Image (cartoon, helix red, strand yellow):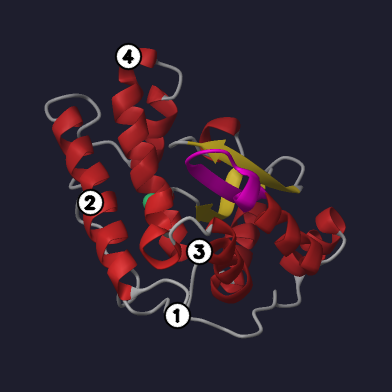
């Protein structure tokens, strides 16, 4: 499996002015590719070499001897979803009406509450990690999660719809220590609610 064959789904200046081209050059070009290269070297000539990322994540999550493989596979998978979670800047970035929007209203009251809770989670997560909007495939409930380091909801039987990277490398060049400013920009102006809705509908159809 060529783990390092990932493509950014848009040009490196696509998320400006919230995330600069320079940040993406480092974040995608150096950090994400670093995880991919490390995963290749760790899995070379092992049974994981030709597995997909989700299978690697599930197989290594509870095995302390496989933590380095888990960390690099999960970080790579998390970043792929992160880029898919964003689209070009919109001043007004609202959730389209439909089943997904109905689910947001049922779980959070309204979309303003959802965005406020995502922001609170992003600001309050201590250290490095990820904020997620997930759906439980069994109950269909939406839930916000915070995870530290490389951890992700795949190992908790939840389907991630969107994710926000709150590792410092995601924002330090543009915002230095001002994580709240980065998180606000990402949540209110970049999140791709159409992509979240598509993932939500595909989870519903799996049943
Ligand atoms: Mn990152």
Q: Is mark 3 within 8 Å of ligand 1?
A: no
In the rendered view, would you say 36 is above or below 105? above
Which residue does the numbered mark 1 point to in the structure image? 17
Q: Residue at x 20, y 37 (%)?
A: 38
Residue 50: image location, x then y, percent? 22, 36
Which residue does the numbered mark 4 point to in the structure image? 65
Q: Mark 1 or mark 4: which is in front?
A: 1
Distance Cα–Cα, label 1 vs label 4: 42 Å
Task: Give the magenta-colored segment's residue range.
Answer: 121-133
128 is within the stretch colored magenta? yes
Q: Are marks 1 and 4 in contact (CB under 8 Å)?
A: no
Q: Nearer the viewer, residue 152 or 165?
A: 165
Can residue 162 be seen? yes
Distance Cα–Cα, label 3 vs label 1: 16 Å
Secondary structure type for disc 2: helix
Classed neighbour count for the residue bearing mark 3: other residues with Cα under 10 Å, few (<14), some (14–19), many (≥20): many
Residue 96: image location, x then y, percent? 70, 77
Distance Cα–Cα, label 3 vs label 4: 32 Å
Distance Cα–Cα, label 3 vs label 2: 19 Å
Distance Cα–Cα, label 2 vs label 4: 23 Å
Q: Mark 2 or mark 1: which is in front?
A: 1
Which residue does the numbered mark 2 point to in the structure image? 33
Classed neighbour count for the residue bearing mark 4: other residues with Cα under 10 Å, few (<14), some (14–19), many (≥20): few
Q: Nearer the viewer, residue 155 or 37?
A: 37
Mark 3 or 1, nearer chain start: 1
Q: Which mark is residue 85?
A: 3
Can residue 206 be seen? no
């Amino acid at each position: 499996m060529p783990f390092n064959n990932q493509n950014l789904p848009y040009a490196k200046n696509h998320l400006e002015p919230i995330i600069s081209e320079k940040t993406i050059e480092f974040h995608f070009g150096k950090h994400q590719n670093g995880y991919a290269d490390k995963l290749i070297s760790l899995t070379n000539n092992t049974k994981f070499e030709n597995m997909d990322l989700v299978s690697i994540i599930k197989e290594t999550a509870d095995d302390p001897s496989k933590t380095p493989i888990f960390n690099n596979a999960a970080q790579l998978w998390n970043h792929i979803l992160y880029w898919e979670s964003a689209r070009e800047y919109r001043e007004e970035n609202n959730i389209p009406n439909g089943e997904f929007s109905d689910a947001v209203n049922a779980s959070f009251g309204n979309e303003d509450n959802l965005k406020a809770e995502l922001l609170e989670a992003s600001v309050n997560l201590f250290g490095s990690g990820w904020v997620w909007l997930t759906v439980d495939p069994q109950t269909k409930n939406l839930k916000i999660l915070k995870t530290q380091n490389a951890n992700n909801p795949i190992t908790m039987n939840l389907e991630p719809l969107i994710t926000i990277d709150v590792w410092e490398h995601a924002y330090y060049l543009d915002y230095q220590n001002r994580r709240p400013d980065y998180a606000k920009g990402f949540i209110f102006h970049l999140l791709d609610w159409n992509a979240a809705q598509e993932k939500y509908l595909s989870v519903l159809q799996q049943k």
